[in-house]
Amino acid sequence: KRAKNEGAIILDAPPASEATHFWLLLSKLAHHIHQSSPETMSDEKDLESVPMNEEDGGDVEAEKGSSEVKSRKERMTGSTHFGDNDFYEEAPEEIGDATWGEVCRACCCHTPKEWGFIFIGLVVLCFFLYFFLLGLELLGSSAKVLGGCTAGAILGGDTNPVAAMMIGILATVLLQSSSTTTSIIVSLVGAGSVDVRQAIYMIMGANIGTSVTNTIVAMGHLGNGDELERAFAGATVHDMFNFLSVLILLPLEAATGYLYYLTKAMLPEEAFEKGDKWTGPIKKIVSPLGNLIIKANKDLIKEISVSEGEITCADYYPVNCTGGIETYDACKGHYGLIACDKKTNKCPAFFQNGASEHDDKVSGGVCLALALFILIVCLIGLVTLLQKMLLGTSTRIIYKATNINGYIAMALGCGITILVQSSSITTSTLTPLVGMGVIQLEQMFPLTLGANIGTTFTAIMAALVSDKITAMQTALAHLFFNISGIIIWYPIPFMRRVPLNAARKLGKATRIWRGFPIVYIVMMFFVLPLVVLGLSTCFTQESKGFTVLGAFLCIGVGFGIAYFLFWWYRKDGRQSCITCMAERQRRKEASQGLPDNMEYIKAELERLREHTGLAEEDDDDEEGDEETAQDEKQVETSEEEE
């Protein structure tokens, strides 16, 4: 039959071609049976799209765009593939388990053409990743320029435990780096400006403040509600762990001082020799380009912190370079918030000879906007490229490849953070992967905990530069604070679910109202620390008036919290809040879709007029109205003549 349809070319073919075709059919039939069995079910290809003969294969090729399976409901295996229309509807517990053989085949079995596309994709991926890291570097540098003076002033104060923790939060939010904050705190302890006990509470606050960066990165998914929910949950699981750890360990440390005495017992009495600074390889790759744009003067922040108020930012201005030459040698010791690079002897693009403090802060603001622009562009590029590369891959394969033992994930997160010298970079890079669904929230959690351990390495290196035992004691307290938190919240499954469930609820809140992340960041990282710091400051002024005022304010805040809890649980406040956020989101979506809806309504009205003939009636009505108007004018004219 095929020979008759296709002509003499097939008739001239050797008989072996028919035998080859028969074995091809048999092998594909066996492939069907093999894939349909429960023991060896595979999702590498859609069973519906496997051609059973050459004619059907041609039909499939011709109708590929229209008949391509895009839903697990239409797939015989019932599995979800990356890029499906119902990809985000699958719950983690519904995902089946794949074999490592399937993972290897999906990763390593490709045609030369596919390998070429994979290579190009990896090159472009590295390009976007490099500039994403550069954006984070610029974000940290510009934040230090904008908030360096304020952070240095508040870090040098002598306060109570609660205020010290809030200072740590605010300083880290201003500097956008817990590594920088802890290094400054260690330097302050080494200089004798801050007590070890107070430094421990500051480090607790720095642990909380460092999670603001990946929360900001999660907002890059505002355009997609599903991705925003996952990304925000993946970012805030770090927040929840830090908040819950501080909630338990801060009172425990204040009551017993266990971190202080544990780290003190681990160190000798005498001092040890100074060590050298260590710079991670990622820092060496990204920093040269970042330093050409802007470089923050960290020494200024440390000097202001140590001076106990005797030195301010104004003492460093105006910038004065010898002979007006903008190099490190010519400007050494005579620049303000923006510094020059000692290694290259060059000054960054935003450096200006004769600049005032206001000029440097304006430069920092412009650089901050540039950093956010780079982050958003690179984030969109990374997410789009990864989606293209993973398109069609089964979720079973993806989760099998990423589902590693939690403690191995911790070690991996710790190692990556030691290399990049920033937990913010580690968690910010992983957050988009959680938003895309490549990494589950359960896998993000141990990676975050490992990043918390890895970031203590920077403080330990800073302590090695100092010859003070107290500096190393502070760095070790940071390490054991994170280890204590992990022991409390990770090994026991019941305790592990507490931060995970809290992060999921926060993620679901973004589904109701996409403006929730902005409110969360402002309230948790700015308003709350400032309010608590203001209340605690009232009790440290050594004035009866301020003490009484602080007591009344605390009573008022306590009554406010009690009423809020009563309203939330007894007066249906939770539902009222959800309704309010849903209404805001509905109004926003309605306003955004209003132009399209108006165009659609106009088109439908036009179609309805053409179908019912209303247009002609409207024309007749208009002609009748014109005739009536003319008659009225004639009557008025005749009356005037009379």
Image (cartoon, rainbow, N blue to C red):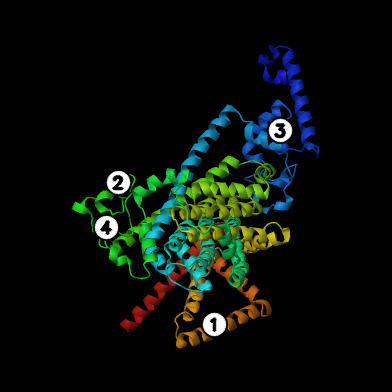
Circle 2: residue type: Asn
Q: Earlier in the sequence, mark 2 or mark 3?
A: 3
The quadrant where residue 334 appears: bottom left
Quick check: marks 2 and 4 in contact, CB under 8 Å?
no
Q: Earlier in the sequence, mark 2 or mark 4?
A: 4
Q: Give how far across and how far down residue 393 sits, in percent.
A: 64, 41
Circle 1: residue type: Cys
Q: Nearer the viewer, mark 3 or mark 4?
A: 4
Residue in view at x 30 percent, y 47 percent: 346
Left/right of residue 173 with respect to residue 72 in the rendered view: left
Mark pair 2, 4: CA separation: 14 Å
Mark pair 2, 3: CA separation: 64 Å
Say few, some or many: other residues with alpha carbon within 10 Å of mark 3 (under 14 / 14 to 19 / 20 or more): some
Q: Give how far across and how far down residue 576 sits, in percent.
A: 62, 75
Residue in view at x 45 percent, y 72 percent: 158
Dot 1 corresponds to which residue?
A: 554
Quick check: marks 2 and 3 in contact, CB under 8 Å?
no
Q: Earlier in the sequence, mark 2 or mark 1?
A: 2
Residue in view at x 76 percent, y 26 percent: 27
Q: Nearer the viewer, mark 1 or mark 4?
A: 4
Dot 3 corresponds to which residue?
A: 50
Dot 4 corresponds to which residue?
A: 334
